[in-house]
Each structure stands twice: as C-alpha cells, then as structure tokens.
Image (cartoon, grey):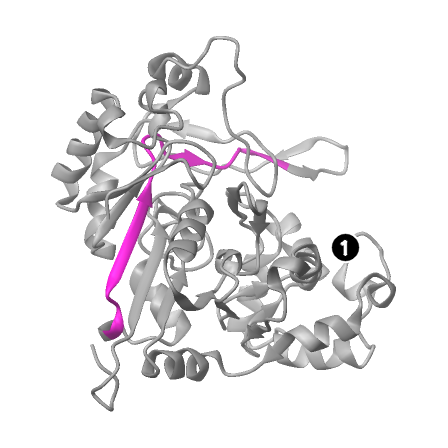
Amino acid sequence: MTTPKGEIKSMVTVILDSQAGSCGKGKFIGYYAKKHDIGVAIDNFMSNAGHTYEDDELGRVMTQQLPTSIVNPNTSLVIGPESAITPDILFDEMFRYKKIIGDRKVIINPNAVVIKQKHRNTEAEVLRSGSTFKGCGAARADKVMRQAELFGSWWERFKAGEVTTEEMGGDGFDWYSKYEVQYLEDHIIVMDTMQYVNDAIDNGEHILVEGSQGCDLDINYGLPYPNTTSRQCHAGQLTADCGISPMLVDEVIMIMRPYPIRISNTTNLKDDKGRTLVASSGDYNGAEEITWDIVKERCGAPADMEFGEQTTVTKKTRRVFEMNWERLRYVTQLNRPTAIALNFAQYIDWGAYKCTDPDKLPQKVWDFINKVQEVTGVPVKLIGTGAGNDDIIDLM
C-alpha cells in the first residue's frame, strides 16, 4: 500500500471483539498501542461500554469515550462521527487521565451524536430487550431521524455557557463549576476526522482502529434481534465509520474468549413500585448457558477464590455460555481476520494463569487453540492469561 506519491507506506490495523463484548479489547488494544509506533488511534465508542487496560506504570485505565491508545503518549487521539458521546463521561475521563493525555488534543468529529437525559428516559420507558439503558440507542435513533443534537453544535453551546443540567441529567451538578472549561477548550479540537486520519495515512503513519462492543452484538450479523446493540460492529463497518477505505486495511486482529458472555438480565432500573426491571439479553444462538461455578471447577481455579465477572459499566454479573463454534466460524467469515487473540486462557486451565512462556502453557490450552485454528483457519497470535498488560503470550 502506498500513498498517491508512491513513496511512503502506512499501515492500518483493526482490533475488534468477535463475541458479545468483554473479550478484553482494552487489554489487547493497550498492549498493541504501547508495542507499536501508533500515529493515530480512532474509535467510535458509545458510552455504554468500558475498555480496561492495566499495567504497573499506569495502573488501571478504563475508558468509555477516549481511545484506549491513550496509554501511548505519542499517539494522536481521535473520536469519530459514529460515536455516541455522553459529555460528562468524556470530560471525566479527560480530567482523570490529565497526566496521561499531557499536551495532546482530543480530536472529535462534529457529527458524533450527543446523549442527553431524554435519551436515557426513552430507553427506560421503551426497551425490554438487553440494554445498558445509557441512552445510546435512543440518541442514535434521533440522529437517523434528523432530530439529534450533534457534538459540533453542542460544543459551541457548552463554550457559550448555555448547557443545562436539566437537559443533560447526570448527578445534578453544575457543569460550569465542576469542569475547568478552559482546559477542555485547550484540549478538544472539533474537526473533520476523516481528512485528519487520511492525511496521517498519506504521511505513512500507523493507524489503529479501535473496535467497540462485539460482532455477536451486531444489529445485522449478530445474535438474534432484538437482543443486539444499535449498530454494526464488524471490521468493514469499523473502517467505514472512520472514513478509511477497506483497500487500506493491512491487519485485522479478532479477540475471543473460551466462554462467551452476555450482560445480565437484570437492570439498574425500577418500576413504579420499586421492583427491579428485567430485560432479556438473549441466548447465545443455542449454546448452553452455564454458571461461573462450572467454569471454576473445569479450569481448576483455587477453591477459596471468588470467581466470576461483572460488567464494566453496569456492575452486574455476566451470564456465561459454552463455546459456540458455529458462531466463531461465522464471525471469522464476516471479519476475515489476519490473527486471533485468545483471552482468558486461564479459564481453560488455571495452570495458564499469568503464564508468559508458551512452552509452559498447559496442553489443555494448546488443544483449545488448535481447535480455534482448525475452525477458523486463522493463527492465534496473542494469548491472554490474566488481567495485566504483562499477562500476554505474544506469538506475532
């Protein structure tokens, strides 16, 4: 791949989740971003999902709006037009990670939709399928109906002091006393991100496209509707959302886990009698739903340890399922990855926990990896064995 000048070679990498989210995108994106010279990282996140990276230097970094590649101090940070932005979440991240951001600017497309309190209200009133009820789907629906306020317009109103707590909701705080407006003005640039990213490509920079959610949540190609997210999540759509031609993509890394999950069927919402509302997150295309106790017993984790997972955003216990090989083959066809990252290898055999030497990886894990490669025809190049950035076996 060359620029129009025929001189400089750039690189475009896409990293995405192959299942229903929570495969460890933050972990692998952060690892990849720190390992490589990433010029620009771009995401189109919605604030209903969290991405977590952890290492000894930075500690735990969790983002819902900013690219996870924030962990590389030399990477430009871009938020694309398909993002659904909850401004207080974005601003909180910018202040929380002030030291990590440093002198960098956060470049935001003016066409990203802004989530307001009315969008959360709509979802609470209408939705009874799996949802985090963060207003993302309702905001996107408003955008399609040409009724939404987009970030470019909202940002100008914010700088003019016109944004109110009533329209935005939140915890009832005063926006202009909570946030240092001058800092935000100094560190946010609203501009055409397609041109910015493609100029970087033409200059030979390495571009990292950060996927959100997961392919099994895709509204068109995911698990049975309506238990999906409100958009498409596959590699082709991710690059389109960034304004990057599919002809320019060099590398697609697809992340998976041995036991896929879905969000809880319970919500943080109450009805008019104070009862917790139930919203089904759906099944897993026929795969058997099991318990975390079964996973714990199979992998041989210590009997006295707490075992299981909670969602990053809603803090509800995740539902867990047997591996669905048919779905894995399907999403491989959809994304055509060049490499697979297997996370949570310790769930196959606890002897893999925090293992970093491929020669010491239990045979049970290698048997699973061989099955993955047989089903997909794609090499497993990264193996996650724990929560930390160092808990990775890199075969790339």
Snapshot quadrant of residue 392: top left
The residue depicted at 20 percent of the width and 28 percent of the height is 366
Taking the image as shown, residue 116 lies to the left or right of residue 39, namely right
Q: Secondary structure at mark 1?
A: loop
Q: Position of residue 88 (x, y in %)?
A: 71, 60
Q: Position of residue 214 (x, y in %)?
A: 39, 49
**Amino acid carrying mark 1 in the image:** Gly
Residue 92 higher or lower than 153, as above or below: above
Snapshot quadrant of residue 234: bottom left
Q: Position of residue 203 (x, y in %)?
A: 35, 82
Residue found at the very far bottom of the displayed protein = 5
Label 1 packing within 10 angstroms: few (<14), some (14-19), many (20+): some
* Range covered by the magenta-colored residues: 248-267
The residue depicted at 46 percent of the width and 48 percent of the height is 26
The residue depicted at 58 percent of the width and 55 percent of the height is 47
- Asked if residue 275 lies in the magenta stretch, the reply is no
Mark 1 = which residue?
Answer: 170
Nearest the camera: 94 or 146? 94
Q: Position of residue 56 (x, y in %)?
A: 54, 41
Taking the image as shown, residue 325 lies to the left or right of residue 22, namely left
